[in-house]
Image: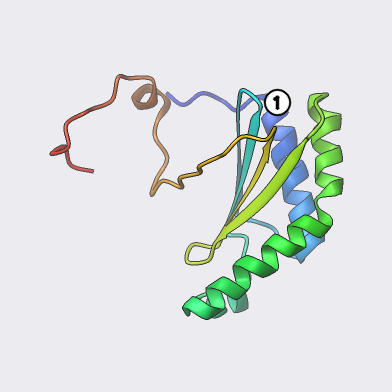
């Protein structure tokens, strides 16, 4: 059975949804918020317009979309940073955004100077599976 998200995560997700709508005019299909130690990751699923998705079909267009969203996030993220501080009581020291053009997913990462590797899975993992030991068997089907 999946664990319900925390109230704080829900509030951050709502703030990110509003931020994205104000920033781009689009409402993401869904928003995920994960926090571990001093890192907060917000994933906005379905955050690209149909025109952006079409542009992202070519390598040059995808690179253009990634750069555009990085610049847009860098210039506009202060309001989201302030909202995260208001919700959590913790100041945001760093923020970065990355876009996966083929899926229309935007990932915003707020850290304290650490290297963050973000992997977007093909599907969610149920909580009971996540809390199990996993498998080291490379032959196990995906």
Instruction: Identify which residue is drawn at 28% across, 25% down.
Output: 134
Residue 17 vs residue 84, the one in the foreground: 84
Q: Quadrant of residue 85?
A: top right
Q: Quadrant of residue 66?
A: bottom right
Sort mark 1 into few (<14), some (14-19) or many (20+) by Cα contacts within 10 Å: few
Instruction: Give the position of the C terminus as an image quadrant.
Output: top left
Q: In this rendering, would 102 be left or right of 87?
A: left
Residue 122 vs residue 107, the one in the foreground: 107
Instruction: Identify which residue is drawn at 42% across, 23% down.
Output: 1
Image coords of residue 82 (percent x, y): 86, 39
Type of colouring: rainbow
Which residue lies under the disc numbered 1? 7
Q: Is residue 57 above or below residue 8?
A: below
* Dot 1: element: helix
Instruction: Identify which residue is drawn at 49% across, 62% down.
Output: 103
Image coords of residue 118 (percent x, y): 51, 44
How many marks do you count on the picture? 1
Q: Is residue 23 above or below residue 68?
A: above
Image coords of residue 117 (percent x, y): 50, 42
Instruction: Identify which residue is drawn at 77% across, 43% down.
Output: 15
Q: In this rendering, would 51 be left or right of 20?
A: left
């Amino acid at each position: 059975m999946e664990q319900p998200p925390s109230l704080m995560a829900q509030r951050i997700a709502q703030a990110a949804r509003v931020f994205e709508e104000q920033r781009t005019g689009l409402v993401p299909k869904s928003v995920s918020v994960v926090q571990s130690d001093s890192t907060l990751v917000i994933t906005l699923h379905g955050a690209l317009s149909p025109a952006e998705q079409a542009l992202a079909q070519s390598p040059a267009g995808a690179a253009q979309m990634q750069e555009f969203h990085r610049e847009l996030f860098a210039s506009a993220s202060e309001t989201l940073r302030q909202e995260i501080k208001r919700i959590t009581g913790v100041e945001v020291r760093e923020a970065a955004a990355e876009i996966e053009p083929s899926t229309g997913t935007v990932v915003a990462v707020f850290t304290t100077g650490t290297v963050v590797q973000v992997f977007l899975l093909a599907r969610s993992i149920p909580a009971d599976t996540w809390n199990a030991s996993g498998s080291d068997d490379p032959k196990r089907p995906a």
